[in-house]
Amino acid sequence: MPSRILVIDDQRVVRQYLRMALQRAGYDVVVASDGRKGIQMLETDEIDLVLTDLKMPYLDGFAVLRYVQRTRRQVPVVLMTAYGSPAVEEEAGRLGAFAYLSKPFEIEDLEQILRRALVKSPA
């Protein structure tokens, strides 16, 4: 059974691209358009990994990461952002993100991170 990845990003084109690319790589992919909707999906769906944008309306990627750390700690979270900085990357690590990616990134780099995260995760 393929690993189920939740992609959370407020940009529709990014969600569509990541869904297609990750499905081609063999993953089961579900998407949400903001952190609030992503958390709702985490409450009802079986998710193996969360790939979330950092800056979004309603709830940002850090809020999603905090929620996962409180409720589903075994689920790895990969943060991605176009507004990165060393301070943001440090905060992501401090909060327990598995990885942090600056946009734009190569899909091959993302796939490597996902493989590592899913091997370490007892999902």
Image (cartoon, rainbow, N blue to C red):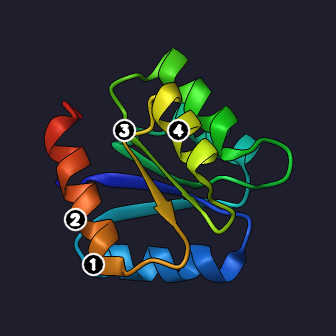
Left or right, 33 with reference to 27: right
Near mark 3 (Cα within 10 A), the count class, few <14, some 14-19 or many ≥20, is: many
- Of the residues tagged 3 and 4, which is closer to the observer? 4
State the SS at label 1: helix
- The CA distance from mark 1 to mark 3 is 18 Å
- The CA distance from mark 1 to mark 4 is 24 Å
Q: Residue 22 location, x and y as percent?
A: 35, 73
Can residue 2 be seen at all in this image of the molecule?
A: no
Can residue 34 be seen at all in this image of the molecule?
A: yes
State the SS at label 4: helix
Can you say whether 22 is above or below 94 in the image? below
Can you say whether 35 is above or below 83 in the image? above
| Camera-nearest residue between 99 and 87 | 87
| Camera-nearest residue between 54 and 40 | 54
- The CA distance from mark 2 to mark 4 is 21 Å
Instruction: Tell which circle, 3 or 4, labels the residue nearer the N-terminal end.
Output: 3
| Residue at the image position 47 percent from the left and 75 percent from the top | 18
- The CA distance from mark 3 to mark 2 is 14 Å
| Residue at the image position 25 percent from the left and 46 percent from the top | 117
State the SS at label 3: loop
Residue at the disc numbered 1: 108
Can you say whether 6 is above or below 68 in the image? below
Instruction: Tell which circle, 1 or 4, labels the residue nearer the N-terminal end.
Output: 4
Residue at the disc numbered 4: 90
Residue at the disc numbered 3: 76
Query: Which corner quadrant holds the C terminus?
Result: top left
| Residue at the image position 34 percent from the left and 52 percent from the top | 4
Q: Amino acid at mark 3?
A: Pro
Instruction: Tell which circle, 2 or 4, labels the residue nearer the N-terminal end.
Output: 4
* Disc on res. 112: 2
